[in-house]
Image (spheres, rainbow, N blue to C red):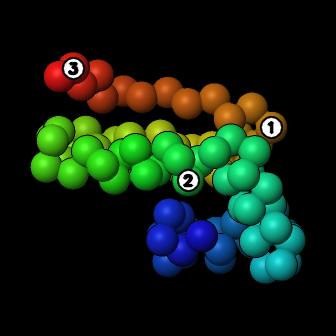
Amino acid sequence: MINRGGPPCVVRLIDETDADVATIAMAYVAVDESYSLHRLNDAIDALDNKIDGQLQLGLYAAVRICCTPAWSGMCAMSISAPVWKP
């Protein structure tokens, strides 16, 4: 959870949702498993040194949007970075 959301992730989610750490961890696992976010992150990881670093960071950010309370239940992603084409 920390590797994907960053160090302040849990604290931010506690502040935004008033949930406890255990509930946040269970919700993270549920979202990750439901939407196969680990597979998306693995695919983005595989792009190391194949695409521009800023584009790769944008892809990680787009996946992270799915884990924010404002998007919970929708998992809608918008990517403002240009699409990479081989």
Left-right relation of 52 to 82: left
Position of the N terminus, as image quadrant, is bottom right
**Distance of mark 1 from mark 2, alpha carbons?**
18 Å
Quickly name the residue at label 2: 38
Answer with mark 1 or mark 2, whichever residue precedes in sequence: 2
Q: Nearer the viewer, mark 1 or mark 2?
A: 2
Q: Are marks 1 and 2 in contact (CB under 8 Å)?
A: no
Q: Is residue 30 above or below residue 23?
A: above
**Distance of mark 3 from mark 2, alpha carbons?**
22 Å
**Distance of mark 1 from mark 3, alpha carbons?**
30 Å
Mark linked to residue 85 = 3
Q: Position of residue 78 (x, y in %)?
A: 49, 27
55 or 48, which is in the foreground?
48
- Disc 3 is placed on an element classified as loop
Mark linked to residue 19 = none
Residue at position x 72%, y 61% in the image: 28
Residue at position x 43%, y 52% in the image: 42
Amino acid found under the numbered disc labelled 2: His
Q: Quadrant of residue 65?
A: top right
Q: Position of residue 15 (x, y in %)?
A: 73, 70
Left-right relation of 47 to 32: left
- Disc 1 is placed on an element classified as loop
Amino acid found under the numbered disc labelled 1: Gly
Judge the density around disc 3: few (<14), some (14-19), many (≥20) Cα neighbours within 10 Å. Answer: few
17 or 78, which is in the foreground?
78
Amino acid found under the numbered disc labelled 3: Lys
Q: Position of residue 57 (x, y in %)?
A: 31, 48
Q: Is residue 75 above or below residue 41?
A: above
Quickly name the residue at label 1: 73
Would residue 71 be visible to someone looking at this image? yes
